[in-house]
Amino acid sequence: MTTDILTQPPETSTIAQLVRAAQAGDHSAFSQLVERFEQTVYATALRRLRNHDEAQELCQEVFVRVLEKIHQLQTPEAFPGWIRSITVRMAINRAVRSAPTASTDNEVLEAVCVEPVTPLANALESERREHLYRGLDRLTEMDRDTLVAFYIEGQSLVEMSDGFASPVGTIKRRLHVARKRLAKQLESLAV
């Protein structure tokens, strides 16, 4: 049977015949399978990975895997679906295992690069902080204590509930009201 496949042009050899010959150890038959399916495997890999280089590399890995496992294929006619499922599985595994590649475009780098603290940034931050504390000073003691406990001291609602001897719902309401009052004070200071 192997000699029949070798004497026939590749177009007339059926896939099932090529698979059977490859299972019998015919390297020429396996090469013909590779030629027939490499574009399909590559397209499937590219669709999953969305990267030309990764898809080409995976394509090679798929054919190595197929060569190792072709003897396990019991229905040679099922080869197209079998190789496709191997490709999809391997592409998914590769996508899950590989870390996402970071883009190094200038726009991306500028967006993620942290600028060093400048004197201007320090001055603006200091001015904002001073403005905030002036606004806090204009609030009632309860509003100021509520905001300071939550935002500056970092107390949880439960801790504030214990400290103020009030239910958590009351603390939430106080925070809401105090934030609104502080916003009004900051607006009046800005004018």
Image (tube, grey):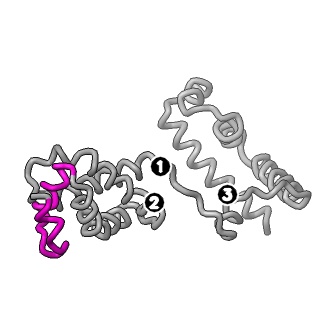
Residue 106, x across and y down, in percent: 69, 69
Residue 2, x across and y down, in percent: 14, 58
**Which residue lies most toward the right here?**
119
Q: Front-most of 67 and 87?
A: 67
Instruction: Identify the residue at horizontal 21%, vertical 61% (top origin).
Output: 29
Pair 1/2: label in front: 2
Residue 31, x across and y down, in percent: 28, 62
Give the quarter of the image for residue 123. Answer: bottom right
Per the model, the C-alpha gap separating discs 1 and 3 is 48 Å
Residues at circles 1 and 2 in contact by the CB criterion of under 8 Å: yes
The range drawn in magenta is: 3-25
Return the mark for residue 31: none
Quadrant occupied by the N terminus? bottom left
Magenta residues: mostly which secondary structure?
helix
Per the model, the C-alpha gap separating discs 1 and 2 is 10 Å
Residue where numbered disc 2 is placed: 54
Circle 3 crowding by C-alpha within 10 Å: few under 14, some 14–19, many from 20: some
Give the quarter of the image for residue 78. Answer: bottom left
Residue where numbered disc 3 is placed: 183
Q: Front-most of 40 and 73?
A: 73
Along the polypeptide, which appears first: circle 2 or circle 3? 2
Residue 62, x across and y down, in percent: 33, 54
Instruction: Identify the residue at horizontal 29%, vertical 56% (top origin).
Output: 87
Residue 118 lies left or right of residue 77; in this view the side is right
Type of the residue with mark 1 = Ser
Residue where numbered disc 1 is placed: 98
In terms of secondary structure, where does tag 1 sit?
loop
In this view, 155 is above or below 29: above
Circle 1 crowding by C-alpha within 10 Å: few under 14, some 14–19, many from 20: few
